[in-house]
Amino acid sequence: MQVEVKSGTDQYTVQQTRLQSVIEQVSSRDMIITDTNVLACYPALSNSKGQIISIPAGEESKSFVQYEAVVEQIFQAGFLRNGTVFAIGGGVVGDLAGFVAATVHRGVRLVQVPTSLLAMVDSSVGGKVGIDLSYGKNLLGSFYNPASVYIDPTVLQTLPTEHFQNGMAEVIKYGWILDVELLEILKKENFSVNSHNLEEIVFRCVALKRDVVEADFTEKSGLRAILNFGHTVGHALEAQAEYKNLLHGQAIAVGMVAEVAIANELGLSQIRTQDVESLFQQYQLPIRPTSYVNIDQLISLMLGDKKSTGNGIAMSLVLEPGQCKLVDNIDPALVRRVLANIWS
């Protein structure tokens, strides 16, 4: 399976291949950036010809401190402009390594090799790379396309159940914003790492994202913002938790339920929150915060979201299944009232 992506002025292929064949492509001038969990699962990485930088696993590594540490190691290793950065890992590795590739020597060749479901269906495709700040998620970054994306669905067998479910939140998101048929498929078949047709779902999501990215690579028209359904609330939850003990998919699952309730309050949608909740519950994803949330602080974080234009809060809201649009200038008081009501 493969999907061709025309992103900005670049073109690249997302293709299915074995991780071992990717490792064999790595030359002595290349750099592999991965994390401790992936390196422990795939000791073959250590047998590659390239040099390896391993970061601590977890969202906390998507930080300026870790970025600086990786860049220091890259230059200490003598990495040159003709080398390639291979990002082998989940979304954190892909975003951080991509930002490194975009900035080292003013840009070097990047190959994305996602090893988590979330990274396969979302973050490895589309050319958005970056790191988190205390002010919010993904606030420092760049649009920087990979030269290639290689997906090996067999590596999903190594994922803990919680991390597979984490990726399913993004899969479900595609159904609500673009693909009603996908929603029905997800309801009928309870997907797991052992599902025989999981790779078809992965590449279906890749193709959906490809279509959006090709139409609005640098987020100028507002179309690409639909990919952020659930993310205004979700990113704020992650930032408030200081990127600890809350996975991205868990945060945006909570965010999607909340944003459907907000759309209802605005009179933009009649989707029942129960219908959104049921699918997340089917995949063991949370629908409410599982610990205390300071809603006032959350509102402040949402006002600083990267989609914001300075007029209230901006959210990508689903109007009906398969139809989503960016809505700005949402009254913070309304958002606060809805969140207080549904989370009470």
Image: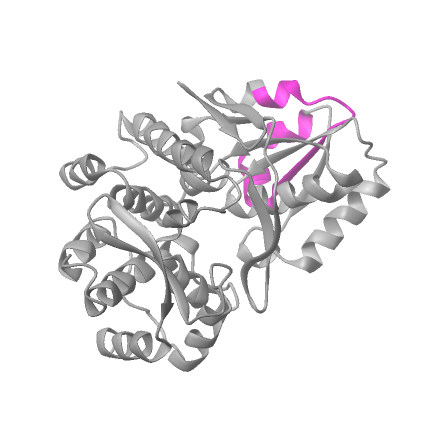
Most foreground residue, 113 or 43: 113
Which of the 4 quarters of the picture holds residue 81? top right
Residue 219 location (% of width, % of height): 49, 46
Residue 122 location (% of width, % of height): 43, 40
Residue 287 in view, yes or no: no
Residue 272 location (% of width, % of height): 13, 59
The part of the chain drawn in magenta is 22-47
Image mark count = 0
Which of the 4 quarters of the picture holds residue 232? bottom left
Residue at (61% x, 39% y) in the render: 144
Up-down: is 26 above or below 31? above
Residue at (45% x, 31% y) in the render: 155
Up-down: is 201 above or below 219? above
Colour convention:
one colour
Most foreground residue, 108 or 269: 269
- Which quarter of the rendering shows the N terminus? top left
Most foreground residue, 274 or 30: 274
Residue 341 in view, yes or no: yes
- Which quarter of the rendering shows the C terminus? bottom left
Q: Residue 35 colored magenta?
A: yes
Residue 315 location (% of width, % of height): 37, 61
Q: Please state if 185 lies on the left or on the right of 40 as rendered.
A: left
Q: Please state if 97 lies on the left or on the right of 229 as rendered.
A: right
Residue at (70% x, 59% y) in the render: 65
Residue at (26% x, 30% y) in the render: 195
Q: Residue 219 colored magenta?
A: no
Up-down: is 162 above or below 108? below
Up-down: is 253 above or below 112? below
Q: Please state if 169 lies on the left or on the right of 115 as rendered.
A: left
